[in-house]
Image: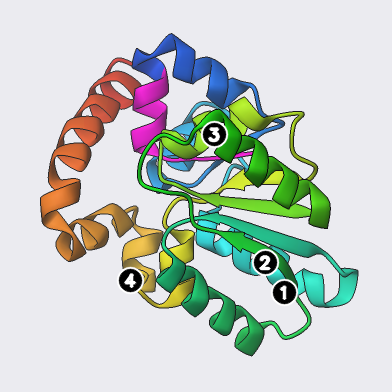
Amino acid sequence: MCVSNVHTTVTAYEDPAYCSVQNGGIMAIPDGGPLSSVGRKRGCKEMSRTTGPDFLNTILASSQEKGYTHFFYGSTDETLDKLCAKINEKYPGAKIVGMYSPPFRPMTDEEDLQIIEIINKVRPHFIWVGLGAPKQEQWMAQHQGKVHGFMVGVGAAFDYLAGNINRAPLWMQKNNLEWLYRLMQDPVRLFCRYVVTNSKFVLNAVIRGK
């Protein structure tokens, strides 16, 4: 399942291969507020924003009753350790059956087979993938049918839940301004992404109506 925002939507619009990846999952939910706003204007009256962190927290909460198990793939060992501690504290009934921080380089075929074996050995209900877009969606597409578990690409959700970065105030979330809050926290990395993709989204989805 893809958790789509303005950045991934614009990327999919411009890249047919990535568009196929986005459309190849069971669903793509609107993480970005602008997506749900445009969706409502185009006839999907009940369309609402569902962020990666919110979806992750909801599933973790329900896991305490339903017995869901979880595998976390992505980020750093330090962040995964913090994430594990936070989940055990906040959702003591949620069972984590594995965590893996991949190297910051292309994995060899042998390494990839090893991680597939690691995941399938513990058979999690949910495989949470936090590699950032478009890498996480591409990884899920490449491993569809190879790993046993429901894959969800949740971007920066690991960092949010681990406490590395803070969510925007509620008023900013409700007014589609969470991107601005993230930009203020990490301007060097996110400036070009947000300025370029947000501008393209407004031009094509809002003004041109494509």
Which type of secondary structure does the marked residue at label 2 adopt? helix
Left or right for 39, reference 174:
right
Looking at the rendered structure, the kind of residue marked 3 is Trp
Q: Callout 1, which amino acid?
A: Ala
The quadrant holding residue 178 is: bottom left
Count neighbours of disc 4 (C-alpha within 10 A) and say few if under 14, some if 14 to 19, many if 20 or more.
Answer: some
Image location (x, y in percent) of residue 166 = 34, 73
Where residue 115 sits in the image (x, y, percent)? 64, 45
The kind of secondary structure element at disc 1 is: helix
136 and 65: which is toward the camera = 136
Q: What element carries label 4?
A: loop
Choose top left, top right, bottom left or bottom right for residue 24: top right
Q: How far is mark 1 from mark 4, CA to CA?
A: 21 Å
What SS does tag 3 mark? Answer: helix
CB within 8 Å, label 4 to label 3: no
Of marks 3 and 2, which one's residue comes earlier in the chain? Answer: 2
Residue 107 vertical placement versus 126 (above, below): above
Mark 1 and mark 4 residues within 8 Å of each other at the beta carbon: no
Say which label, 4 or 3, has the lower sequence index: 3
Amino acid type of the residue that numbered disc 4 sits on in the rendered structure: Ile
At label 2, which amino acid type do we have? Thr
Residue labelled with disc 4: 165
Query: Would you name the residue on which mark 3 appears?
Result: 139
Determine which of the numbered discs, if any, sits on residue 58 in the image.
2
Residue tagged 1: 61
176 vs 193: above or below: below
The magenta segment is 1-12
